[in-house]
């Protein structure tokens, strides 16, 4: 079994995406702010009704540099946990 970790967090004020570009921020921000990426990912997952999430496909885009592998791992783990 995969262990599930519950983390209490609060949203960051600048985590409001503009348009269809997602959350475009400098990599250093994701690495320096505690739970910055998980907060955003959970807000996305929570915004879609559970019945609508089942059987869906989530697409994660990246240019493949810097924080990409870690970010993708976090997104996949959180999607599976949800």
Image (spheres, helix red, strand yellow):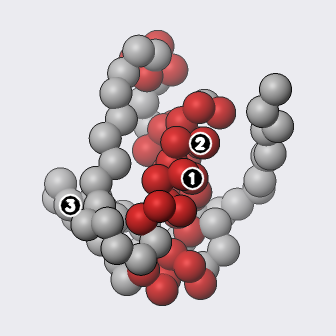
Pointer 3 or 2: first along the chain: 3
Locate residue 1, reporting x and y percent: 81, 26
Q: Look at 51% across and 20% down and name the residue there.
A: 50
Q: Which residue is mark 2?
A: 78
Locate residue 7, reporting x and y percent: 77, 53
User: How many numbered dots are placed on residues in this image?
Assistant: 3
Nearest to viewer (mark 3 / mark 2): 2
1 shown above or below 13? above
Q: Secondary structure at mark 2?
A: helix
Mark 1 and mark 2 in contact? Answer it, CB < 8 Å. Answer: yes
Locate residue 80, reporting x and y percent: 59, 32
Q: Look at 52% across and 42% down and name the residue there.
A: 76
Could you tell me how far apart the alpha carbons at marks 3 and 1 are, in whole angstroms?
19 Å
Which one is nearer the viewer's eye here, 71 or 35? 71
Q: Secondary structure at mark 3?
A: loop
Q: Which residue is mark 3?
A: 21
Q: Is residue 70 left or right of residue 62?
A: right
Q: Is residue 43 visible?
A: no
Q: Secondary structure at mark 1?
A: helix
Q: Residue furthest left?
A: 19
Could you tell me how far apart the alpha carbons at marks 1 and 2 are, in whole angstroms?
6 Å
């Amino acid at each position: 079994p995969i262990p599930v970790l519950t983390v209490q967090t609060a949203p960051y004020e600048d985590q409001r995406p503009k348009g269809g570009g997602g959350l475009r921020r400098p990599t250093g921000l994701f690495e320096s702010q505690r739970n910055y990426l998980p907060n955003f990912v959970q807000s996305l997952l929570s915004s879609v009704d559970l019945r609508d999430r089942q059987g869906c496909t989530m697409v994660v885009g990246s240019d493949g540099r810097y924080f990409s592998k870690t970010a993708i791992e976090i997104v996949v783990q959180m999607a599976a946990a949800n």
